[in-house]
Image (cartoon, rainbow, N blue to C red):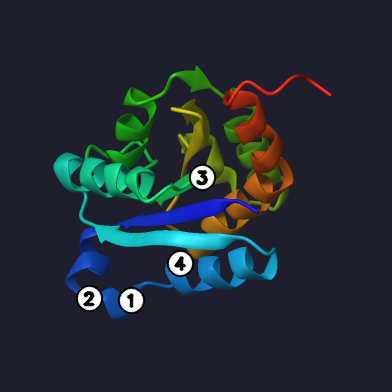
Amino acid sequence: MLRWAIVVTSDKVKANPELDQITPMARELIAARGHDIVYTAIAGNDKVEILHAIAEALARGADVVLVTGGTGPNPRDVSADIVYSLCERALPGIGEEFRRRSIEKGVVNAMLSRAGACGFAGRVLAVSPGNPDAARLMLELLFEIAGHVVEQLRGAKHS
């Protein structure tokens, strides 16, 4: 069982939390797999707010922190920059597989996404686009690999 945190980044959702479609979906998917959500937050597209939310998620014991939104090339898309600035171990295959599966589904703009994941302090930090379908895809990818990645980040021997 892993402990998860979801950080939704969006000025629009922060102004009106009822617009948040990701947190309820993530709660349902995470619970269905027998994992716990230890923290959720909505942050604006602001470096300090996003860093605070990630720090709080880690302080609450999250093994996996998924930050949604802010992965595109727009100057306001800062989430990917923030997550990657914290990385201790790059996990490039997760972002590559996210883009591959997205393009396979006909989402050509996925080529522009900076979605991905990395290791930090024995935990997985991941970032996905803020579209609910994209967040779902990232969760599905993480469900496949996160347990093993967390073990490896914490020094477990290869099996």
As displayed, is residue 97 above or below residue 87? below
**Where is residue 7, by image quadrant?**
bottom left
Q: Nearer the viewer, residue 77 or 40?
A: 40
How busy is the neighbourhood of tag 3: few (under 14 within 10 Å), some, or many (20 plus)? many
Q: Secondary structure at mark 1?
A: helix
What distance separates the C-alpha of mark 3 from that of mark 1? 24 Å
In terms of sequence position, does the residue under pointer 3 or pointer 1 come before the other?
A: 1
Answer with left or right where residue 64 lies relative to residue 32: left
How busy is the neighbourhood of tag 2: few (under 14 within 10 Å), some, or many (20 plus)? few
Residue at the disc numbered 3 = 64
Q: What is the number of the mark on residue 19?
A: 1
Residue at the disc numbered 2 = 16
Q: Secondary structure at mark 3?
A: strand
In terms of sequence position, does the residue under pointer 3 or pointer 4 come before the other?
A: 4
As displayed, is residue 22 above or below residue 152? below
Name the residue furthest right.
159
